Image (cartoon, rainbow, N blue to C red):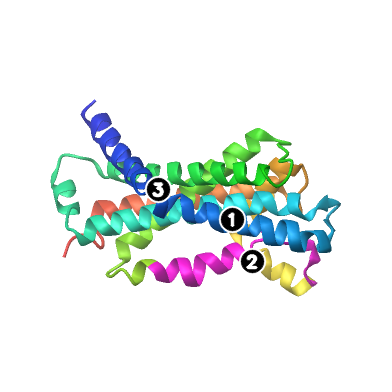
Amino acid sequence: MRHLIALQTILFREIHRFLRIWPQTVLPPVVTTSLYFLIFGQLIGNRVGDMRGIAYMDFIVPGVVLMSVITNAYGNVVASFYSTKFQRNIEELLSAPVPSWVILIGYVGGGIVRGIVVGSVVAGIAACFTDVKLAHPAVIVSVSAMTATLFALAGFLNALFANSFDDISIIPNFVLTPLVYLGGVFYSVDMLPEFWRKVSLGNPILYMVDAFRYGFLGVSDLNVQSAFIILACCLALLGGLALLLLERGTGLKS
């Protein structure tokens, strides 16, 4: 019961934090994705035509929604947890009788909620531009929840190792963003030359976007089961690593 109260407190604080500053956390991705739908979906999409027999606007909607989930789940945890380190509030948390798993779930939970909230708002914006289809709702919910959890954990690890505010922007700018844009958000992987198609298969985000698109449209370029296997393996790896590092105080204790 004591741990449950601590978990509720951390989780509520994390959710309240990003909702309180919604013009900085929710509004910018909504504006950006609206421009994606307007420019790529409406203006350029009409010239592109169909993609795998699907209108281009409909094709990009799942990828853009999942892109919002990924970036917001990651960004929420890395910014919040590093700020806690920077302001030395983490010392109070570590000295309190709160288990590491409670701290981890609390911060990651806040990232998951923000990712799902922003993704849902973006999906609502997409519905203003096209008729959003839901071929397999269970796949949509499971992929979005697992993806948000995975990148919230990745954001937590980034915050653990970060020593400055510059460090929390390196991974998103130079690793995460290229992987997302090369993850089949705006194109089908079958369009690529054979060499680059094989290279793309090494990008785990490609499988997540493809499975998420299957949930909306019922079509996929890859095996959907592969996406769930990759997500489950990455979740186990990052979750175990984050908990181990937190237990050891890596990046937190000098």
- Look at the image and give the residue range highlighted in magenta: 169-193
Residue 207, compared with residue 225, is above or below; it is below
Whether residue 41 sits left or right of residue 88 in the image: it is right
Q: Nearer the viewer, residue 122 or 23?
A: 23
Q: Nearer the viewer, residue 124 or 196?
A: 124
Give the mark toward the camera: 3 or 2. Answer: 3
Q: Which residue is mark 1?
A: 33
Q: Which residue is mark 2?
A: 182
Q: Which residue is mark 3?
A: 22
Rendered location of residue 26, percent (x, y): 46, 49
Mark yes or no: residue 237 visible.
no
Mark yes or no: residue 26 visible.
yes
Q: Nearer the viewer, residue 46 or 105?
A: 46
Report the residue at 51% width, 55% height from top: 29
Amino acid beneath label 3: Trp
Mark 1 residue element: helix
Q: Is residue 177 magenta?
A: yes
Residue 125, compared with residue 44, is above or below; it is above
Amino acid beneath label 1: Thr
